[in-house]
Image (spheres, coloured by chain):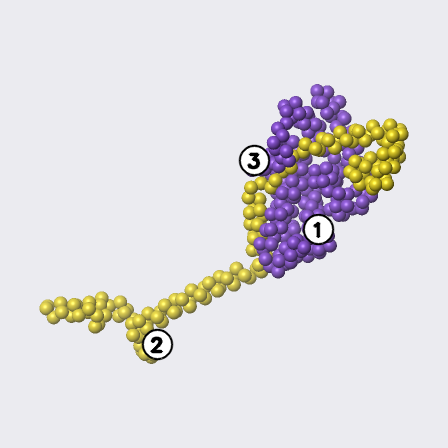
């Protein structure tokens, strides 16, 4: 369900006010970019995909029906754009810092991690990265929406246009596969303390 | 060997199982070593995501998107619009030139009221005489002619 502010913005846009779209863009650009970034693994592809997402939204917004929330609708477009791309291995830099021009958000910027924790985090990140690379795009999408974007099952069902049962089974399968791949990573890299 | 209730582990981790389901599954965990172990293993997987960084859109992102939407709007215009704009520009230019010519005639007292002959004379090169008759320059030239 949409909030009244979103409905007003969409109405303004439908009446020809281009600045209303800019407001929508500014409100959602970080979430959409973050999703694309984690789906595609690098800043360049993520920016292309995020731009394509908003262009598709711009073209489709006049036909948008206010029976779903705007961000769910944008997530759906972005997920489909990213699944369609699949040009490069994903999660290349999930933990590897930011690319040029990109900004990172640190929830606890003042809590500087110790070198040991940084090392462990890097090892864990590497294991997760390689494991995620091996997931199919559909499983990758669902696990990113759940674990990184922190959407509820209901929201994921809405974004991916699938049933709640499918959401449950896909998330469970994605985690099982991730677990399996992470164990394999640990066996192949005994030095990694995953 | 696999417990049929392992499918509940993910919804349990995500708190998508409901209060009754949660209590029942926690009770099951006390008796099922397989599910308890699987739960702990999946917690490790979840923990790996806890240090994933969030990225913000790069600087200038919205400007680049808005530029692309403007480009889309330009492409939406019908094919004949550029030709129409060119025609309109040419028409405006013609009107300005005509208005300039007419204004020039009025300023040299040879306006349209003077008739067709005046129109012809107004377009003659006499307009560009060294000094119009009756002007200060014309009087000076007349005096120099008289001296000769």
Q: Mark 1 sits on what residue?
A: A69
The answer to whether residue A130 is visible is no
- Which chain is purple in the rendering? A
Q: Are marks 2 and 1 on the same chain?
A: no
Q: Residue furthest left?
A: B147
Q: Which disc is residue B112 wearing? A: 2
From the top left corner, tell me how far across and down residue A148 is, in percent: 70, 38
Quarter of the rendering containing residue A135 = top right
In the depicted view, which residue is nearer to us: B15 or B106? Answer: B15
Callout in the foreground (3, 1): 1
Secondary element at tag 1: loop
Would you say the residues marked 3 and 1 are in contact, meaning their CB atoms lie under 8 Å apart?
no
- Establish if A18 lies above or below A189: below
Q: Are marks 3 and 2 on the same chain?
A: no
Q: Mark 3 sits on what residue?
A: A100
- Establish if B128 lies above or below A192: below
Secondary element at tag 2: helix
Quarter of the rendering containing residue A41 = top right
Whole-number angstrom distance, CA of label 2 to CA of label 1: 69 Å
In the depicted view, which residue is nearer to us: A25 or A3? Answer: A3
The answer to whether residue B35 is visible is yes
Q: Are marks 3 and 1 on the same chain?
A: yes
Residue shown at 73% from the left, 54% from the top: A67
Residue shown at 67% from the left, 37% from the top: A38
Q: Earlier in the sequence, mark 3 or mark 1?
A: 1
Tell me if A36 is positioned left or right of B104 in this view.
right
Circle 2 marks a residue in which chain?
B
- Which chain is yellow in the rendering? B
From the top left corner, tell me how far across and down residue A39 is, in percent: 68, 38
């Amino acid at each position: 369900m949409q909030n009244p502010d979103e409905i007003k913005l969409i109405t303004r846009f439908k009446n020809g006010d281009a600045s209303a779209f800019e407001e929508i863009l500014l409100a959602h650009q970080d979430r959409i970019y973050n999703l694309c970034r984690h789906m595609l693994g690098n800043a360049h592809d993520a920016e292309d995909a995020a731009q394509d997402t908003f262009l598709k939204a711009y073209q489709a917004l006049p036909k948008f029906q206010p029976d779903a929330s705007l961000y769910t609708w944008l997530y759906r477009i972005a997920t489909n754009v990213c699944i369609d791309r699949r040009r490069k291995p994903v999660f290349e830099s999930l933990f590897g810092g930011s690319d040029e021009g990109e900004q990172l958000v640190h929830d606890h910027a003042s809590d500087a991690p110790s070198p040991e924790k940084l090392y462990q985090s890097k090892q864990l990140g590497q294991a997760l990265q390689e494991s995620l690379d091996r997931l199919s795009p559909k499983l990758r999408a669902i696990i990113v929406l759940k674990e990184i974007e922190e959407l509820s099952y209901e929201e994921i069902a809405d974004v991916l246009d699938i049933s709640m049962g499918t959401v449950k089974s896909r998330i469970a399968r994605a985690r099982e596969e991730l677990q399996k791949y992470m164990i394999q990573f640990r066996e192949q890299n005994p030095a990694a303390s995953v | 060997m696999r417990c049929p209730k392992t499918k509940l582990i993910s919804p349990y981790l995500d708190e998508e199982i409901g209060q009754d389901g949660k209590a029942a599954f926690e009770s099951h965990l006390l008796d099922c070593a397989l599910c308890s172990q699987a739960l702990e293993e999946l917690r490790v997987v979840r923990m790996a995501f806890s240090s994933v960084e969030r990225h913000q859109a790069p600087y200038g992102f919205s400007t680049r998107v808005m530029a692309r939407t403007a480009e889309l709007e330009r492409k939406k215009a019908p094919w004949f619009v550029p030709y129409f704009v060119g025609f309109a520009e040419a028409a405006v230019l013609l009107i300005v030139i005509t208005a300039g010519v007419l204004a020039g005639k009025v300023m040299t007292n040879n306006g349209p009221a003077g008739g067709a002959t005046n129109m012809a004379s107004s377009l003659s090169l006499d307009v560009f005489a060294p000094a119009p008759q009756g002007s200060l320059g014309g009087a000076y030239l007349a005096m120099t002619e008289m001296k000769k």
